Amino acid sequence: MKTTVDLEQTLLDICADMTACEDKGVVANYIPELAKVSPDRFGMSVCLADGQQFSAGDAATRFSVQSVSKVFTLAIALGRYGDGLWRRVGREPSTHDFNSVQELEVRRGIPPNPFVNAGAIVTTDMVLADSTPAETLGEILRFIRQAASDEDILIDPAVAASEKLSGHKNWALAHFLKSFQNLKHPCERTLGVYFHHCAIEMTCEQLARFGRFLAGFSKSPNLVSRENIRSINALMMTCGHYNGSGEFAYRVGIPAKSGVGGGILAILPGKASIAVWAPGLNKQGNSLLGTKALEALSRSLDWSVFDSGGQ
Ligand code: GLU
């Protein structure tokens, strides 16, 4: 069993190794604002059950959480609707790209899970319910701030505007959902909220603190029950890295959700909430070095949920 002193050193070593890597992946460029971020950034932060937090590299720098925000909306939707969510979204991994229109047509408008874009758009539509977009975004921000114990978490309006202009696939998905009666609000309204929650900015330190309730060692905000936490972690394990989820489970073995901003939130129930940020992506749209760093951490501390701890 490694001590926390080891953890501090392990994070510094991983950070040095990642910084030295030549292949850093490709920064997302289909959202022009995200393309401005340097692929050389790297940060990591870990919260432990005893309340300690350890960080390395650019852990205090804000980045666009993008699809990590799908965890926020899923938690709110499950809290509010429970199993009602599954009438409109599946909970199976997908072998298609995260923004596949083809898959949605084949599935007659029912997205495979809440983490592919179509599934997250439906989840956002449910969270929006009868509120205004501003009220809904306020609710999402309050939820994150409470979980992270930090009021200083905001939306970057330039990133939201950039995606509104260039997110053609998401517009296509929303129109498909609408045509299958799986979108209650006008496309513009639901996507407006979706683009804005994807444009929330957080640091690794804030994101790791946010994840504490999912790891089971902080009070859960809102209505997120233990049962719902179990569901969220299961979905992160099976679907959190899109069509790269199997590979991620094999290599890292920790439930996690990635975003095209290069962030990953990883939850080791009972043990740790981990956030990593490295903007360069692999071909499935997941952080290349973020995955590598989590694999190194998991191996070094025996942190895979699949590790028996024996021998
Ligand atoms: N806002 C991004 C999109 O809809 C999120 C995708 C991601 O982070 O994986 O394309």
Image: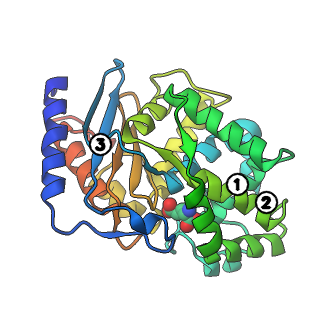
* 286 to 73, vertically: above or below: below
* 164 to 54, vertically: above or below: below
In this figure, which residue is indicated by the disc labeled 3? 44
The numbered dot on residue 189 is 2
Q: Amino acid at mark 3?
A: Met
Where, by quadrant of the figure, is residue 282 drawn? bottom left
The numbered dot on residue 31 is none
Alpha carbon of mark 2 to alpha carbon of mark 1: how far?
7 Å
Alpha carbon of mark 3 to alpha carbon of mark 2: how far?
34 Å
Crowd rating for badge 2 (residues with CA inside 10 Å; few <14, some 14–19, many 20+): some
Residue lying at 24% horizontally and 66% vertically, measured from the top left:
24
Q: Amino acid at mark 2?
A: Arg
Going from N to C along the chain, the mark reached first, 1 or 3, is 3
Alpha carbon of mark 1 to alpha carbon of mark 3: how far?
28 Å
Towards the viewer: 252 or 148: 148
User: Pointers 2 and 1 in contact (CB under 8 A)?
Assistant: yes
Going from N to C along the chain, the mark reached first, 3 or 2, is 3
Q: Amino acid at mark 1?
A: Val
Residue lying at 34% horizontally and 58% vertically, measured from the top left:
248
In this figure, which residue is indicated by the disc labeled 1? 193
Residue lying at 38% horizontally and 35% vertically, measured from the top left:
205
